[in-house]
Image: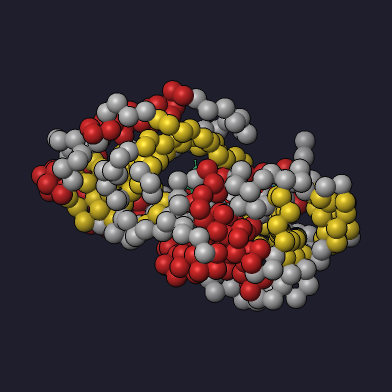
Amino acid sequence: MADVAIIGGGIAGLWTALELLRAGASVTVFDGRRLGEGASTAAGGMLAPGAEGDGLAPAVQAFAIASRKAWTHAAADIENASGIDIGYADCGSLIIARDDAEAAALKAQCAQRFGAWLDSSALASTYPQLRHGLAGGAFVAGDACVDNRALIEALSAAVTQAGGTCAFGLGDVGVRVGGNRVLGVRAGGRNLDFPRVLLATGAWTSHVSIEGGSATDLPPVMPVKGQMGMIRVAALPMRELVWLGHTYLIPRRAGQLVLGATSEDAGFDPCISEGAVEKLADDARWLVPSLAGLPVVERWCGFRPATPDGLPVLGQTRVDGLYVASGQYRNGILFGPLVARTMAACISGKASAIDISAFDPKRFGPRHEH
Ligand SMILES: Cc1cc2nc3c(=O)[nH]c(=O)nc-3n(C[C@H](O)[C@H](O)[C@H](O)COP(=O)(O)OP(=O)(O)OC[C@H]3O[C@@H](n4cnc5c(N)ncnc54)[C@H](O)[C@@H]3O)c2cc1C
């Protein structure tokens, strides 16, 4: 198969590169920044179609469930390919109901969709480390988590070991187009020819420069900023992902309890607000009294790639040979294995194992700049 250039060294770009390399392609992954500076490293690493699934469009929900299934094998595969432990754990989710109104809603959801309902006393006896007097909780067995920082290092190592090239830290890389066909990329001041180019550029997708073509051919993708923090503990209070309203607690290895996350329409503003992260920590300390007095030791933020209709964008654009994998919004880590598989099939001209026509980048129509 002819050469493929991938712009974007996050989960979508690296994992698709690995699939393409395994199918015999030669692949170069470009990134303007150093490894691990996109959303994939900033994320929480939850693989949670159960707890996160509510409110997703049916096509996205089906994609989420299929990708969650793919994760079980994929995690071991990436560890074998890279020699790096990515901290995958079948931990389940625990969703907390603070009061009777939340309990009624959650109990109804349990009956319809998932999970075992725990009333107030069952919750207290199963999880004595939580504050007393909570109204109940739902345990969702199928959810899992991964250490996404280790995952990105592992994917990059696996790509290199499979013969791929990673060209990082080059500044913004652009696409070159001629006669509605992709010609290649412009990277580090040089024109490089590639017959196929994949934009795995996350929240920056609409900002990629297109020489000889029109930016209106790219789908609209907006950044949704998320701030997170981490508390270090001697022993993790529990192994489950825990959901408390909009706040969640993620147990990571080495006594790291990750707290997420804000959801802000703030463009690419990189500022971290101590107050916003402290609010997440206050929620965690309220729920788990043994965390009282433990400080937040690390804060960071990232940008989720969101689309106007809430669906990912996966497939070929209007420009022949130019593909996009973006718009995964809150679930790009969960979607990792299936995005890679479907995009590798699409770029190789093979049928995808799962129908991704609802995610076609061309559904938006050409945008007109004002
Ligand atoms: C705070 C937060 C928490 C999250 N938690 C979870 C979670 O628990 N579970 C989950 O499934 N998802 C989660 N997500 C969502 C998930 O992180 C994203 O959907 C996913 O990482 C997107 O991956 P990506 O590879 O498309 O983009 P990214 O990881 O952002 O990678 C895109 C890369 O493209 C590069 N790039 C962009 N433009 C150019 C250019 N012109 N030239 C060169 N390089 C370029 C960037 O430098 C970047 O490295 C979270 C997101 C955030 C922000």
Q: Position of residue 270 (x, y in %)?
A: 59, 31
Which residue is more in the foreground, 320 or 235? 235
- Residue in the picture at 43% in, 63% down: 68
- Residue in the picture at 52% in, 43% down: 42
| Quadrant where the N terminus is found in the figure | bottom right
78 relative to 243 in the view: left or right = right
| Quadrant where the C terminus is found in the figure | top right
- Residue in the picture at 89% in, 58% down: 178
Q: Position of residue 29 (x, y in %)?
A: 71, 58
Query: For the view shown, which residue lies furthest in the top direction?
Result: 275
Q: Position of residue 316 (x, y in %)?
A: 70, 62
122 over 343 or under it: above or below: above
253 over 131 or under it: above or below: below
- Using the rendered image of the protein, determine whether residue 73 is visible from the camera's viewpoint: yes
- Using the rendered image of the protein, determine whether residue 364 is visible from the camera's viewpoint: no
Which residue is more in the foreground, 220 or 208? 208
309 relative to 228 in the view: left or right = right
**Image color mode:** secondary structure
269 over 107 or under it: above or below: above
Q: Position of residue 203 (x, y in %)?
A: 62, 44
Number of disc labels? 0
- Residue in the picture at 43% in, 31% down: 297
